[in-house]
């Protein structure tokens, strides 16, 4: 039986339980009067009590269960019963529908007015459980941002369904007014994608509807299916904010916009492509706060990092980062540039596009319409007295030849190339028309990389590797490997985030001689291996055995490599 009435103030309860002193309570109440914050929140901020103490006290007093939201299966239907605005204000999230009741997680359930507001908006009696404030905040961001997007779609539908001329709907809907339904829809969609950690948003026209998908950890997930009649206004709005020609519907267009969302600086690269059912939109999201990483955050093994450091210390030559599209090459380039960016170095880049602006570095944007290509930009850069040059991508023979000759004349050149592994990069340059002796003289090192998914730390489980799995891993004896079983924290995927695997080839004397003598790719690989190069497969194997990635990811990567 509870010792206190539900109306008993939290401070008095904690005082009675001797969790705080009268002096601590008085100072907290004084601060609360001026800040408007909740008492429990201030007590935790001041370090007088822990969040665990607060939750246990409330649970004991009120007879309310504590739930761990990281493992709790939250019902999407339940989250739709109240608005995101109300959830944020009350720090509460609906968990499941229980007939005429609604299970709601709260961090401070003593505010009866908050509970009444939830009951009034949901139309159901609230059955309150306890959860930590941080878990509730994270759950709101994950589950309720989608509700905001859905509401924006509903508002848009109400406004546009009255108009039967769907092809000209954009003329009837004001796509520039900040509070118009289409503006709220686009903003909500971007915000939701960011909260999910998405890298891209795909808005795809189908025959009878639109399909909105986001790419999270390299895989596309469908999140919304707006009606077909919303298509024209959505495309028009995206074109307007990205500076495209809204009248041009026959040709592909590219644009860019900088936004500030929830205190984050976001760059959006936008591509519009005409298809048989209308224009398809892809928005690449670049979070400035998370994009620029140090070398230590890139996932290099100790051996590979040491080799990469020695390559970066070269006074001249070409350093190449290779891999398929979406393998993190640009992130690695920027990490290298950030490392090399010192007061005594003149660093100039030519990029398409400039993905991140770095203070102290002169960055040039490729402009194909004006005739500014990688090759022409590189020629101009050489007249700017550079010490270090970064070329976003070597796409053709002209650019490759200029880069190689710039390296031979005393410059350090960093660039990317699309190849499967480090040794095949040499063959790719030869195919471009670069003579072997020039390649041998200029290339200092090659970094090949891929991205593999990290196992979610919240739902990671261990199991003994089967004989087949041990054969694939080339391991003997008892081997423990891991996988994610799926939980709310990782959207039941079993993965959260990605990490790069690397293959670092340092061009030493032996490798240089192999290049000059036109050795085959197999022979070149053998020479590189003798020189200490470890393969992408080996790096991935280490991540599996250390519990960072799964056997499924290893199989996927190895299959693609072979």
Image: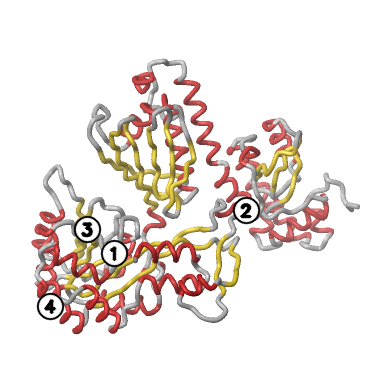
- Nearest the viewer among 255 and 431 is 431
The alpha-carbon separation of the residues under discs 1 and 4 comes to: 22 Å
Q: Earlier in the sequence, mark 2 or mark 1?
A: 2
Q: Earlier in the sequence, mark 4 or mark 3?
A: 3
- Residue at 53% x, 41% y is 145
- Viewer-nearest of discs 2 and 4: 4
Disc 4 secondary structure class: helix
Count neighbours of disc 2 (C-alpha within 10 A) and say few if under 14, some if 14 to 19, many if 20 or more: many
Contact between marks 2 and 1 (CB within 8 A): the answer is no
- Viewer-nearest of discs 3 and 1: 1
Residue at image mark 4: 516
Disc 3 secondary structure class: loop
For residue 420, the mark is 1
The alpha-carbon separation of the residues under discs 2 and 3 comes to: 42 Å
Q: Position of residue 172 (x, y in %)?
A: 38, 19
Q: Is residue 99 left or right of residue 327?
A: right
For residue 393, the mark is 3
- Residue at 60% x, 48% y is 139
Q: Earlier in the sequence, mark 3 or mark 1?
A: 3
- Viewer-nearest of discs 4 and 3: 4
Residue 67 position (above or below residue 228)? below
Q: Position of residue 127 (x, y in %)?
A: 76, 42
Q: Quadrant of the C terminus?
A: bottom left
Residue at image mark 2: 135
Q: Is residue 479 left or right of residue 102?
A: left
The alpha-carbon separation of the residues under discs 3 and 1 comes to: 15 Å
Q: Is residue 189 left or right of residue 35?
A: left
Disc 2 secondary structure class: helix
Q: Earlier in the sequence, mark 2 or mark 3?
A: 2
């Amino acid at each position: 039986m509870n010792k206190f009435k539900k109306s008993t103030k939290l401070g008095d309860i904690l005082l009675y339980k001797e969790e705080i002193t009268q002096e601590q309570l008085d100072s907290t109440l004084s601060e609360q009067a001026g800040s408007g914050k909740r008492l429990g929140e201030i007590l935790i901020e001041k370090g007088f009590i822990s969040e665990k103490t607060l939750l246990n006290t409330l649970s004991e007093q009120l007879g309310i269960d504590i739930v761990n939201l990281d493992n709790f299966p939250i019902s999407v239907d339940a989250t739709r019963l109240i608005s995101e605005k109300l959830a944020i204000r009350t720090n509460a999230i609906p968990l499941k529908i229980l007939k005429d009741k609604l299970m709601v997680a709260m961090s401070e359930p003593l505010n009866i007015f908050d509970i009444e507001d939830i009951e009034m908006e949901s139309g159901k009696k609230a059955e309150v459980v306890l959860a930590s404030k941080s878990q509730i905040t994270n759950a709101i961001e994950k589950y309720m941002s989608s509700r905001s997007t859905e509401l924006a779609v509903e508002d848009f539908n109400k406004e546009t369904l009255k108009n039967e001329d769907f092809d000209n709907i954009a003329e009837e809907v004001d796509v520039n007014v900040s509070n118009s339904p289409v503006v709220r829809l686009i903003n909500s969609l971007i915000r939701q994608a960011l909260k999910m950690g998405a890298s891209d948003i795909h808005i795809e026209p189908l025959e009878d509807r639109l399909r909105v998908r986001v790419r999270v950890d390299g895989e596309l997930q469908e999140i919304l299916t707006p009606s077909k009649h919303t298509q024209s206004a959505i495309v028009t709005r995206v074109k307007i904010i990205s500076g495209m020609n809204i009248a041009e519907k026959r040709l592909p267009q590219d644009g860019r916009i900088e936004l500030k969302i929830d205190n984050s600086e976001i760059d959006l690269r936008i591509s519009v492509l005409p298809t048989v059912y209308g224009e398809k939109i892809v928005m690449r999201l670049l979070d400035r706060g998370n994009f620029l990483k140090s070398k230590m955050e890139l996932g290099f093994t100790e051996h590979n990092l040491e080799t990469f450091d020695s390559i970066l210390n070269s006074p001249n030559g070409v350093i190449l980062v290779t891999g398929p599209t979406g393998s993190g090459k640009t992130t690695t380039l920027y990490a290298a540039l950030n490392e090399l960016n010192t007061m005594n170095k003149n660093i100039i880049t030519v990029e398409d596009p400039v993905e991140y602006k770095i203070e102290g570095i002169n960055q040039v944007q490729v402009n194909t319409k004006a005739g500014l290509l990688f090759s022409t930009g590189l020629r101009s850069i050489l007249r700017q007295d550079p010490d270090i040059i970064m070329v976003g991508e070597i796409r053709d023979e002209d650019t490759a030849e200029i880069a190689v000759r710039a390296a031979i004349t005393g410059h350090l050149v960093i660039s990317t190339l699309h190849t499967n592994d480090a040794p095949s990069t040499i063959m790719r340059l030869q195919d471009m028309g670069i003579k072997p002796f020039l390649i041998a003289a200029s290339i200092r090192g090659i970094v090949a990389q891929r991205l593999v998914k990290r196992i979610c730390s919240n739902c990671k489980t261990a199991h003994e590797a089967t004989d087949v799995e041990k054969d694939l891993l080339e391991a003997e004896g008892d081997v423990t490997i891991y996988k994610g079983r799926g939980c709310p924290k990782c959207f039941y995927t079993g993965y959260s985030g990605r990490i790069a695997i690397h293959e670092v080839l340092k061009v030493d004397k032996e490798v240089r001689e192999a290049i000059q003598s036109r050795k085959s790719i197999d022979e070149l690989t053998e020479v590189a291996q003798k020189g200490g190069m470890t393969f992408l497969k080996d790096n991935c194997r280490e991540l599996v055995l250390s519990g960072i990635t799964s056997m499924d990811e290893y199989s996927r990567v190895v299959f693609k490599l072979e």
